[in-house]
Structures are given as structure tokens and as C-alpha cells.
Image: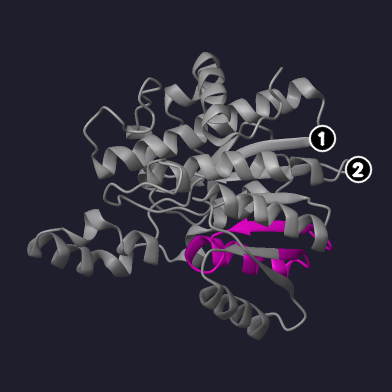
């Protein structure tokens, strides 16, 4: 990873922060792509305290907003101009129904559509001399997700926050598989693959609306179990493996090796929702995503 240029979305905390920290330790030049500048600067300070010679800079990015993605692309072009690794990590969990400035359901926009648009925006900047990678961060919950491609944006179906989360995550993995298929057909040196952290003790998880709404008994049980839940520093292993390990292939999906992939000290290939593997669904989702984001790339493949 020495001197590689890396972009990590949602790098101010949790899995994203730990991924960025790991890449800085390896000598990469890391772009912290974050919505909150205060939190991004705090993360940058923490990285520099641990890795004094780290090369990490901040470029503002709200992945839920198309204008922010466009602005990020322009600033990245001016400041960097080349990319070796993109980690699409930013996400939210089980939030109440809300929509972004263009009417996209917020979990779908943050957890999937933003990654689709950002990937297309940054694709021209990837190095063409060595293998480059796009790593999309998934979730255990993708296994329970369903894709309604006739109402992806929750305009007719009654919204459910956990179903919305599962939908956004199975869409992300379907995109990962379809992206790699299209990259292979184009003859690209870039591979696309996914990884999930298992069940991690992060602020995103703890602050989800679904967990906040738990009964007193369930909340008490959650608190008692918290010491057993992997920390973000432990849970990031599959993501770092997907991003840096030798022998990985496009279309791979990694997770923790332990029981039910909840946690583990090592990484293994993870289970994939059969929906995400279906090329016909991936193709339909791609066309729909281009229409929803206005970002078109690898379209004829």
C-alpha cells in the first residue's frame, strides 16, 4: 500500500476510521471523505497522533447528496488526480423515513445510490498501471434484504426502517457483483469486491433508530452483551483484507470467520444473498441506478 492513493467514505468514525488508520499505517495516502468537517478533523488528529508521518487529507462528502458527490469529484481531481483504492463505507442504519434533496429515500441514497454515483464519478481517476480495487462495505443484514425493483425508492410500499436497511445493503452487494462483471468485460485492471464487518460495536449501530427504540429489557440485554461484541478495530479486518490481501478476486465477498459471521479473529469468504448473484437483477438495478443518479458508466457492457 506504500504511496497508494485511497479514498474512504465515512472515515471519521467506526469501521471507516479504522480502515483509514490501517491504510495510513501501511504508507498509503488516504483521503478522508466525510460529511462532518469537525468529526473529520478529529479523526485526522487521532490518526496523526498514532501515525505521525501519515498522509491523510480531508475532502468534504455527503454521499446522500448528488451535488456533494459532484463537488467531491471536482476537488479530488484538483488535489489528487489518481486513485488506487476506493472504499465505499459510509452508511446509516434503520433510520426513520426521510428523503434527500432529490427525493431519494435516505437509507437507499446513503448506503447504495451514493456509492454507485461516487464510483462512476471517480472511475476515470483509477490508475491503469497496477491492479486497483473498489471495496464496497456490506452488512450481515443484506441476507434478509429484498429488492423491489418496481418500487426501489419506497414510493408506493409502506416504509419499514429495517426492511429499508436490508434493501439498501442487498442493492449494494448486487451492485458490487454487477460492477465487477462489467469491469471484467471492459478489460479493466480494476476489481470490485465486498466485505462486511460482522456485528461491530460502533456509533452507527448504537445510534440506529431501531436499537434506540428497544424495550428496557432488550436495551439492558444489549448493554450486558456489549463487551462481547467486536470493536471497530477488530471488525475492520475483513475490509482491510479485501482492500490489501493478495489472492483476492473480483466479486469476492469477505466477512469474519466466527459463528454466523458475527465476529472472528480471521477472515473468510462470506455468505451471499442469492439475489445479489443474479446477473439479470444486477443489470436491471444498474439501469435503474443510472436513471436515479444521472451518472452513467460502463453502460454498454
Horizontal side, residue 92 vs residue 249: left or right? left
- Badge 1 element: loop
Split into 4 quadrants, where in the image is the N terminus? bottom right
Tell me which residue sits at (25%, 28%) in the image: 157
As measured in the structure, the alpha-carbon distance from the residue carrying label 2 to the one carrying label 1 is 8 Å
Quarter occupied by residue 139: top left
Q: Which residue is mark 1?
A: 189
Range of magenta residues:
1-30
| Residue 111 picture location, percent across and down | 46, 46
Quarter occupied by residue 128: top right
96 to 183, vertically: above or below: below
Crowd tier of the residue under label 2, counting other residues whose Cα lies within 10 Å: few below 14, some 14–19, many 20 or above: few
- Badge 2 element: loop
Q: Earlier in the sequence, mark 2 or mark 1?
A: 2
Q: Are marks 2 and 1 in contact (CB under 8 Å)?
A: yes
Q: How many marks?
A: 2
Magenta segment includes 144: no
Q: In this orientation, does residue 58 appear?
A: yes
Horizontal side, residue 162 vs residue 47: left or right? left
19 to 98, vertically: above or below: below
Q: Which residue is mark 2?
A: 129
Colour mapping used in the image: one colour
Amino acid at each position: 500500500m506504500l504511496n497508494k492513493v485511497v479514498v474512504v467514505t465515512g472515515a471519521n468514525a467506526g469501521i471507516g476510521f479504522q480502515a483509514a488508520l490501517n491504510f495510513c499505517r501501511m504508507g498509503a495516502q488516504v483521503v478522508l471523505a466525510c460529511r462532518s468537517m469537525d468529526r473529520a478533523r478529529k479523526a485526522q488528529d487521532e490518526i496523526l497522533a498514532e501515525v505521525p508521518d501519515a498522509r491523510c487529507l480531508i475532502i468534504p462528502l455527503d454521499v446522500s447528496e448528488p451535488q456533494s458527490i459532484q463537488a467531491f469529484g471536482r476537488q479530488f481531481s484538483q488535489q489528487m488526480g489518481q486513485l488506487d483504492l476506493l472504499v465505499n463505507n459510509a452508511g446509516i442504519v434503520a433510520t426513520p423515513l426521510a428523503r434527500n434533496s432529490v427525493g431519494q429515500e435516505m437509507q437507499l441514497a446513503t448506503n447504495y445510490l451514493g456509492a454507485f454515483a461516487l464510483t462512476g464519478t471517480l472511475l476515470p481517476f483509477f490508475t491503469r498501471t497496477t491492479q486497483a480495487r473498489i471495496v464496497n462495505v456490506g452488512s450481515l443484514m443484506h441476507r434478509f434484504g429484498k429488492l423491489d425493483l418496481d418500487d426501489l425508492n419506497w414510493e408506493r410500499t409502506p416504509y419499514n426502517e429495517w426492511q429499508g436497511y436490508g434493501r439498501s445493503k442487498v442493492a449494494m452487494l448486487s451492485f458490487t457483483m454487477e460492477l465487477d462483471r462489467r469491469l471484467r468485460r471492459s478489460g479493466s485492471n480494476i476489481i470490485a469486491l465486498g466485505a462486511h464487518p460482522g456485528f461491530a460495536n460502533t456509533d452507527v449501530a448504537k445510534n440506529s433508530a431501531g436499537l434506540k427504540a428497544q424495550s428496557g429489557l432488550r436495551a439492558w440485554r444489549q448493554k450486558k452483551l456489549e463487551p462481547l461484541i467486536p470493536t471497530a478495530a477488530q471488525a475492520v479486518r475483513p475490509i482491510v483484507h479485501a482492500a490489501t490481501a493478495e489472492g483476492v478476486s473480483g466479486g469476492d465477498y469477505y466477512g469474519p470467520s466466527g459463528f454466523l459471521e458475527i465476529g472472528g479473529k480471521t477472515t473468510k469468504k462470506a455468505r451471499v444473498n442469492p439475489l445479489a448473484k443474479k446477473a439479470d437483477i444486477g443489470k436491471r438495478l444498474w439501469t435503474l441506478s443510472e436513471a436515479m443518479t444521472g451518472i452513467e458508466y460502463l453502460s454498454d457492457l
